[in-house]
């Protein structure tokens, strides 16, 4: 062996996950690193595969809602709405207005609680341990509210085909109004703590950059796409439910780096508060909360595709019915799964420490990636 | 591997000789053993109090209350933790490099403890009042690097190796500003004896004469002991503990003990070098020393509760491009002032000017548009119309 061969440096292969504190669940990435630099990255998924789509073919339509709860387990209401919306589209149902408004309020609150979790874990990924406590404080307020409305903190099973399971508590509006100022204050506090922190800026700017065109090519949606400068939001582009009645802004980033993806979520929380306030003002005080639907709904033969804006991006539900009480085929286009595809190009030529930051900034939920 | 082992044995040998000569040199041996034992006990109590204080302080920062269950206000929590750590199963993976794996905690712990032999708690409360105190402290402190590399290498774990190498790069870089500032202080005091440095200040604390040196020393010290925001060799979020990843139970707790002892050492050095040591009115000297030390420690905890972690390249850049030049600049300025015999307030003036310069530099960088990215807001109604 010559001296040169003996001293030649080799890339080492580092396995991160599925048991690693910063892979946000059971995600695994295999990194080839040259010292501290990442040469290549190989993402592995499937550790949380439960076959929800196939399972759905054996369940009644009303039973499938629970499966969707467990898909994106951070944005339960939003995911429920995507499925319920698909069935309603297929059956051409008109949902009572009051139910639509309650749905929107719950979905937007859920978006805030999801982004609060993102905010906290982003801090953890960067090495700051305080943001997660601030994030969870606000999350807890919202989660308590959800518990009061649905009886469950996470797996709500509250939306029904054609409306809601039951009336929310009498003091629902008062409770939401009561919790909003605290949340607003919490958002501002968190913003002051982390967003323009010198160290955080240094860690997140110019890392994991993806251009607008590339982001579109990879099928990125939601905040991760908007961070690259493309104002695409299903709530505005193709409004569902009653989203066309609200006045809100879509945050758009400049460079598409990790900081932009982070800042999108912080700004979106403010916009969600705005939407909730408008919805509370417009909501009819009384009225039915469920349309007339048979106990076991049988959508007509045919197919429907319904898309909605989840906290993580665009969720699409493709439903094929043969006229029976169970779907013939159900396919979900989960936002996290599509967003994850961009991880590999983002990670090239970054540092090992950046890997967890970039992964964190994509805000994946493994329950949804693997389904 | 064999090289590391030989190095470790060499280090331990040197330590043994130094320890023997320092501790037993020419006095009643039995008394000194007793004193050394007492010192170890005091340090253990201090470390326990630090873990409790850290959890309480972080809890307050994070709107929690911290430990509350064991004892009043949870003061006995560290004792419970210590018992848990000692009786826990000590897992050693089968693939580790046994001798190095076993020796590493010792090589980290022994120098961290030996440092304290010369650190005075007050004018007369010191085990050995060495005339070369500053040199001894910094030399001993520097030896812990080898233990960290050994821990990383001996664990035969990729995270561990990366952590070990990170610690080597980090600790060696930050040793330089630390030493240069210590030299400056020694020049001002005219001695390397820690007791004399502390007592020579009187009420003219060196933080007043050397405001910039204080900050540089504190930051370099934080990096030297691997505290947040410079804890990159432990890097919980990517390296999951770095060199300590494969250690558990008693072995891990020795690393832990050493880490907190080092943190306390930095606080003690800052106190002795810049905060006038144990000088203060009314209270006994030890009380003043401990009050100042704990104040510095609280500052360190505060930083941990606020700041994210730097990345390795940023850490190295900060060390070599900011702290090293600043420390040398300080060294040159102090030399010049002393050489020409200018009055002491010139030190203060120069220190404040450099500090202000650094502050202006940071402020302009932060205020510039390039450094402050913004979020553009697009109205949803406009998007709808398109």
Image (cartoon, coloured by chain):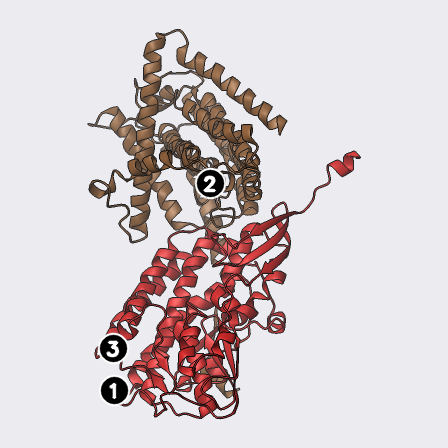
Instruction: Tell me the CA gap for discs 2 and 1.
Output: 65 Å
Secondary-structure class at tag 2: helix
Residue underneath mark 3: A172
Residue underneath mark 2: B354
Dividing the picture into quadrants, the one containing residue B316 is top right
Position of residue B385 relative to residue A54, above or below, is: below
- Judged left or right of residue B27, residue B357 is right
Which chain contains the residue that carries disc 3? A
Residue underneath mark 1: A285
Q: Total label count?
A: 3
- Judged left or right of residue B36, residue A175 is left
Dividing the picture into quadrants, the one containing residue A230 is bottom right
Few, some or many residues within 10 Å of mark 1 (<14, 14–19, 20+): few
Q: Colour of chain B?
A: brown
Residue B204: x and y, percent? Answer: 33, 28
Task: Please tell me whether mark 2 or mark 1 is closer to you in this view.
Answer: 1
Secondary-structure class at tag 1: loop
Residue A363: x and y, percent? Answer: 48, 64
Q: Which chain is red?
A: A
Q: Earlier in the sequence, mark 1 or mark 3?
A: 3
Position of residue A59 relative to residue A72, above or below, is: below
Q: Residue at x 48, y 54 (%)?
A: A22
The numbered disc on residue B185 is none
């Amino acid at each position: 062996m010559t001296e040169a061969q003996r001293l030649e440096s080799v890339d080492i292969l580092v396995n991160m996950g599925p048991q690693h504190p910063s892979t946000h669940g059971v995600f695994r990435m295999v990194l080839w690193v040259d010292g501290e630099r990442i040469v290549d990255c190989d993402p592995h998924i499937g550790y949380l595969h439960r076959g929800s789509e196939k399972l759905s073919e054996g369940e009644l339509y009303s039973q499938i809602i629970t499966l969707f709860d467990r898909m994106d387990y951070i944005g339960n209401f939003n995911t429920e709405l995507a499925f319920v919306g698909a069935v309603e589209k297929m059956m051409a149902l008109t949902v009572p207005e009051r139910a639509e408004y309650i749905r929107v309020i719950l979905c937007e609150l859920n978006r805030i609680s999801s982004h609060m979790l993102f905010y906290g874990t982003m801090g953890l990924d960067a090495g700051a341990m305080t943001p997660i406590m601030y994030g969870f404080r606000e999350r807890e307020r919202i989660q308590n509210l959800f518990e009061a409305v649905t009886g469950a903190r996470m797996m709500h099973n509250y939306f029904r085909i054609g409306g809601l399971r039951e009336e929310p508590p009498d003091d629902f509006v008062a409770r939401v109004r009561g919790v909003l100022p605290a949340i607003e204050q919490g958002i501002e506090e968190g913003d002051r703590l982390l967003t323009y922190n010198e160290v955080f800026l240094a860690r997140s700017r110019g890392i994991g950059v993806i251009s607008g065109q590339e982001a579109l090519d990879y099928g990125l949606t939601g905040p991760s796409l908007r961070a690259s400068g493309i104002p695409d939001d299903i709530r505005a582009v193709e409004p569902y439910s009653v989203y066309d009645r609200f006045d809100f802004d879509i945050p758009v980033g400049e460079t598409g780096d990790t900081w932009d993806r982070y800042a999108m979520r912080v700004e979106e929380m403010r916009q969600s508060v705005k939407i909730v306030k408008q919805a509370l003002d417009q909501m009819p005080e009384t009225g039915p909360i469920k349309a007339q639907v048979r106990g076991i709904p049988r959508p007509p033969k045919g197919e429907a595709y319904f898309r909605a804006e989840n906290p993580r991006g665009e969720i699409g539900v493709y439903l094929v019915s043969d006229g029976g009480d169970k779907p013939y085929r159900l396919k979900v286009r989960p936002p996290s799964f599509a967003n994850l595809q961009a991880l590999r190009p983002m990670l090239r030529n970054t540092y090992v420490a950046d890997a967890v930051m970039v992964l964190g900034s994509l805000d994946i939920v493994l329950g949804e990636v693997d389904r | 591997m064999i090289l590391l082992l030989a190095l470790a044995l060499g280090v331990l040998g040197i330590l043994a000789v130094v320890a023997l000569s320092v501790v037993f040199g020419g006095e009643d041996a039995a008394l000194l053993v007793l004193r050394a034992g007492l010192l170890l006990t005091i340090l253990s109590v201090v470390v326990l109090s630090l873990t409790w204080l850290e959890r309480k302080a972080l809890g307050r920062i994070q709107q929690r209350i911290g430990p509350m269950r064991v004892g009043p206000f949870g003061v006995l929590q560290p004792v419970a933790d210590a018992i848990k750590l000692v009786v826990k199963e000590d897992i050693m993976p089968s693939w580790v490099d046994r001798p190095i794996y076993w020796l590493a905690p010792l090589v980290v712990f022994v120098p961290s403890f030996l440092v304290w032999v010369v650190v005075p708690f007050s004018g007369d409360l010191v085990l050995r009042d060495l005339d070369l105190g500053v040199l001894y402290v910094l030399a001993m402190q520097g030896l812990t690097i080898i233990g960290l590399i050994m821990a990383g290498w001996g664990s035969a774990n990729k995270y561990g190796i990366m952590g070990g190498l990170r610690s080597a790069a980090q600790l060696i870089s930050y040793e330089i500003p630390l030493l240069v500032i210590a030299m400056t202080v020694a020049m001002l005091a005219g001695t390397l004896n820690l007791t004399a440095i502390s007592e020579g200040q009187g009420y003219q604390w060196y933080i007043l004469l050397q405001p910039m040196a204080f900050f540089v020393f504190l930051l370099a010290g934080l990096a030297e002991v691997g505290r947040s925001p410079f804890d990159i060799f432990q890097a919980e979020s990517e390296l999951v503990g770095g060199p300590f990843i494969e250690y558990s139970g008693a072995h891990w707790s020795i690393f832990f003990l050493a880490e907190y002892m080092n943190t306390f050492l930095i606080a003690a050095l800052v106190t002795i070098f810049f905060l006038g040591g144990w000088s203060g009115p009314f209270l006994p000297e030890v009380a003043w020393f401990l009050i100042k030390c704990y104040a510095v420690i609280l500052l360190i905890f505060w930083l941990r509760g606020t700041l994210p972690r730097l990345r390795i390249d940023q850490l190295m850049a900060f060390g070599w491009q900011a702290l090293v030049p600043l420390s040398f600049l300080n060294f040159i300025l102090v030399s010049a002032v002393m050489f020409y015999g200018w009055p002491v307030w010139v030190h203060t003036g120069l220190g404040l000017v450099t500090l202000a310069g650094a502050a202006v530099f940071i402020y302009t960088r932060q205020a510039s548009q390039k450094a402050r990215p913004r979020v553009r807001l697009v109205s949803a109604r406009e998007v709808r119309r398109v």
